[in-house]
Image (cartoon, grey):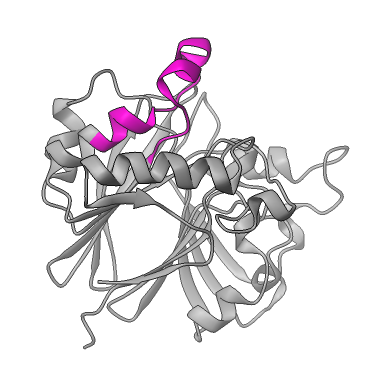
Amino acid sequence: MDHTVAVKLLGVRGTVPVHGADFARFGGATSCVLVRAGGEGLILDAGTGLQGRAFRDFFPGSAFTMLITHSHVDHLMGFPIFSPFFDPAVRCGVYLKTREGRTGREQLEALMAPPLWPIRTDCLKAAVDIYDVPAAFSVGPVEVETMEACHPGGCTIYKIICGGISVVYATDYEPESDSPDDFCAFAQGCTLLLLDAQYTRSEYERNRGFGHSTIPRSAAIARRCGAEQTLLIHHDPTRTDRQLLELEAAVHAQYPNVRFGRGGEEVLL
């Protein structure tokens, strides 16, 4: 078995998708990450990054697993029009935690229902099974562990483990300090950390309680976790490429293992 873990970032923008020349380098698509590990294909979130040819190029098979952190629309915009869901040969397990009394299926049906959307979940042709999110479970040889993030309405943090390699995906997370014990224990020593860092310090003072971290805080947490490498994600939708490059340079000078994630980049672990 190939124990290489491949990670492809399809969308690293937060809140809403953006487009234009000012956003071309880091990308304007919302949250979506592909992981290929142990012969399994996993999709982390279903934002607008899910669209396009990259999925088929990355996952040649017809079976995959989708791990959704929460049902805020920037993480689900790509779900209703994801073309493999209309292919009868496709099999997919979707994990989405029950929240506010609604199961994962009920949350998806709320999105895919008139007057907000014309096509309901029962129109999907693929074999799509929707599961609640347990504390830990397996996808073939891949182990998945979870914890809850501090975020309005809740959000799941996922850790994917295969062949001694671990990837932690922690988007939409507002830590209470620069060294939160629970998260640092969960992510300790991970191979790759994908961590929310939407705000600067000054922006955070205006947006406290919105469920996102700051760039300096997330960089400090990455060091405390001992992550081998960290990509900061969920970039503010107003942040241009030039601004991101300037912020990244400042962070990277202090934390050499930390940089900003770019839409379309692939990391082999």
Does any portion of residue 114 appear in the rendered image?
Answer: yes
Relative to residue 167, is residue 94 drawn left or right? right
249 or 258, nearer to the observer? 249
Relative to residue 102, is residue 196 drawn left or right? left
Residue 234 image offset from top left, x and y in percent: 49, 42
**Magenta stretch contains residue 150:** no
The residue drawn where x is 86% and y is 40% is 114
Which image quarter: residue 204? top left
The residue drawn where x is 21% and y is 50% is 256
Residue 216 image offset from top left, x and y in percent: 31, 30
Q: Which residues are magenta?
A: 196-219
Quarter of the picture holding the N terminus: bottom left
The residue drawn where x is 57% and y is 48% is 241
Residue 63 versus residue 220 in the image, above or below: below
Relative to residue 245, is residue 83 drawn left or right? right
Residue 36 versus residue 49 in the image, above or below: below
Quarter of the picture holding the C terminus: bottom left
The residue drawn where x is 42% and y is 39% is 247
Residue 69 versus residue 50 in the image, above or below: above
Exactly how many numbered labels are in the figure?
0
Does any portion of residue 96 appear in the rendered image?
Answer: no
